[in-house]
Image (spheres, rainbow, N blue to C red):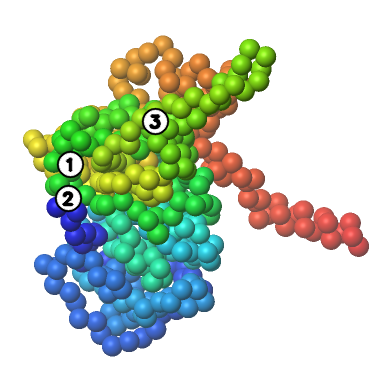
């Protein structure tokens, strides 16, 4: 009864063109003529791969964008249409989409460069992780640009069916995002959800780090629970509710009755489970402890009853990805009924009215919004750039608070040298609007005239 069918992954509307951008086509992408594509009705709100509306300015209406099969080793589904339409104000609006998918993806590195290039061309920012076990990311951009990126990813059949959560972006954040602020002349402001000129596509061993290769959500995973059914599940006294996030996240908000493991990293979760429930790989109901005699010899073994496993476990995290691995781990350890919140806290805050909500506080998010509240509106917390932890207005009144340097949660753990380096970075940002100055910390480009003189000088010397 608790399990429900997965709703459409993300209702992405068919909108008009994105703002102009500098065309620099990826050599791996080819534009092929095809027959005209019927324009979809705006009343059709469901995303259907691979036919998505993503208008790229400057392309004829009758063209499609085809992803070369050399780009991805997995099978593709054919050309991806690119349609254009009239300009409207909605084409400028931004969305933030978090997504992930566990899959057998050993050739993940092949996607990195073309995906990063396409994000840069479309001014889609954020962070994406590629690993042998799948993909995980959070990106920001115009709706049609984000649709293009998601369609590009899902053109690989192994990555179809991304689990996605969309969050709105306020007009004020959009202005900062596009660089419309006097305090940030060279790039988007530090308070923007993401900088438009910065996207990270990283290669890692895991898309979410647990450090246990034997745990595979593609083979075994808990039962998904829709946000609407979540309250009934966690209100059941036989259900143990576990927050799978870390201490700096649970500190600002969690569900009622939730158990907080107080971990500093997700890889600590298995140790917490084994300590808390005294689980083992054996089927014995008792653990045996050796007791030494007076001369150091082992006299006997004492059996200590283990804490009984809970009848039912319900877990949740920010977007659902950590619960996939956590539920797989618990099932491997012998837990019988394991549930997890589908879409995570973000989907719950989006769909469940505040008047019915069992959520208390705000939800930490891994972008520059820092936290969100019901309806996924931006929360009240800021970020300490010294330790990347959320801080409240009260925290910023503490003597340990120094903007860009430290906060009450990291002040005592940072050396004077670390604090001074942080102050230097902050001065760079205040001067240039970007850390590292105009060249972002790289060696400045030589002046063409100077370079010509140096080149002539070298030629004369060699002669």
Mark 1, mark 3: which one is toward the viewer?
Answer: 3
Residue where numbered disc 1 is placed: 233
Counting from the top left corner in percent of width and height, residue 427 is at 51, 28
Residue where numbered disc 3 is placed: 306
Mark 2, mark 3: which one is toward the viewer?
Answer: 3
Q: Do residues under tags 1 and 3 come within 8 Å of each other at their CB atoms? A: no
Residue where numbered disc 2 is placed: 2
The secondary structure type at the circle numbered 2 is loop
Q: Which one is in front, 44 or 310?
A: 310
Q: Do residues under tags 2 and 1 come within 8 Å of each other at their CB atoms? A: yes
* Residue positioned 49% across, 24% down in the render: 302
Q: Which one is in front, 189 or 322?
A: 322
The answer to whether one can see residue 349 in this image is: yes
Mark 1 and mark 3: Cα distance apart in space? 26 Å
| Earlier residue among tags 2 and 1 | 2
Quadrant (top left/top right/bottom left/bottom right) for the C terminus: bottom right
């Amino acid at each position: 009864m608790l399990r429900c069918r997965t709703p459409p992954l993300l209702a992405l509307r068919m909108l008009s063109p994105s703002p102009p951008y500098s065309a620099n086509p990826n050599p791996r992408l080819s534009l092929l003529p095809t027959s005209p594509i019927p324009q979809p009705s705006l009343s059709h709100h469901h995303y259907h791969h691979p036919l998505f509306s993503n208008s790229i300015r400057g392309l004829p209406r009758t063209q499609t964008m085809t992803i070369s099969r050399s780009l991805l080793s997995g099978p593709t589904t054919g050309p991806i249409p690119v349609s254009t339409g009239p300009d409207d104000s909605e084409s400028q609006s931004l969305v933030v989409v978090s997504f992930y998918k566990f899959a057998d993806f050993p050739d993940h590195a092949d996607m990195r460069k073309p995906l990063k290039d396409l994000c840069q061309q479309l001014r889609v920012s954020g962070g994406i992780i590629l690993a042998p076990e799948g993909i995980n990311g959070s990106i920001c951009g115009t709706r049609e640009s984000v649709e293009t990126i998601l369609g590009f990813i899902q053109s690989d059949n192994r990555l179809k069916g991304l689990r996605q959560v969309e969050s709105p972006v306020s007009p004020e954040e959009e202005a900062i995002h596009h660089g419309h602020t006097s305090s940030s002349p060279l790039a988007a402001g530090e308070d923007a959800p993401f900088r438009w000129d910065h996207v990270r596509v990283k290669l890692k061993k895991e898309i979410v780090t647990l450090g246990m290769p034997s745990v595979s959500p593609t083979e075994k995973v808990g039962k998904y629970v829709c946000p609407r059914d979540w309250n009934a599940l966690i209100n059941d006294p036989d259900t143990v509710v576990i927050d799978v996030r870390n201490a700096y996240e649970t500190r600002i908000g969690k569900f009622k009755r939730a158990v907080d493991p107080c971990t500093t990293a997700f890889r600590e979760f298995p140790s917490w489970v084994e300590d808390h429930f005294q689980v083992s790989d054996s089927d014995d109901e008792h653990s045996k402890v050796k007791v030494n005699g007076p001369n150091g010899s082992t006299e006997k073994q004492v059996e200590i009853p283990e804490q009984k496993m809970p009848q039912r476990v319900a877990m949740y995290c920010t977007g659902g990805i950590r619960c996939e691995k956590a539920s797989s781990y618990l099932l491997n350890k012998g837990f019988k009924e394991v549930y997890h919140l589908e879409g995570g806290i973000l989907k719950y805050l989006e769909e469940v009215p505040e008047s019915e909500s069992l959520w208390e506080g705000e939800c930490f998010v891994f972008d520059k919004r820092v936290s969100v509240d019901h309806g996924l509106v931006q929360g009240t917390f800021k970020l300490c750039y010294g330790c990347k932890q959320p801080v409240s207005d009260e925290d910023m009144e503490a003597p340990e608070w120094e903007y860009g340097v430290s906060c009450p949660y990291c002040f005592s753990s940072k050396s004077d040298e670390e604090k001074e380096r942080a102050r230097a970075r902050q001065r760079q940002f205040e001067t240039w609007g970007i850390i590292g100055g105009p060249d972002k910390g790289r060696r400045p480009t030589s002046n063409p005239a100077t370079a010509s003189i140096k080149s002539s000088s070298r030629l004369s010397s060699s002669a």
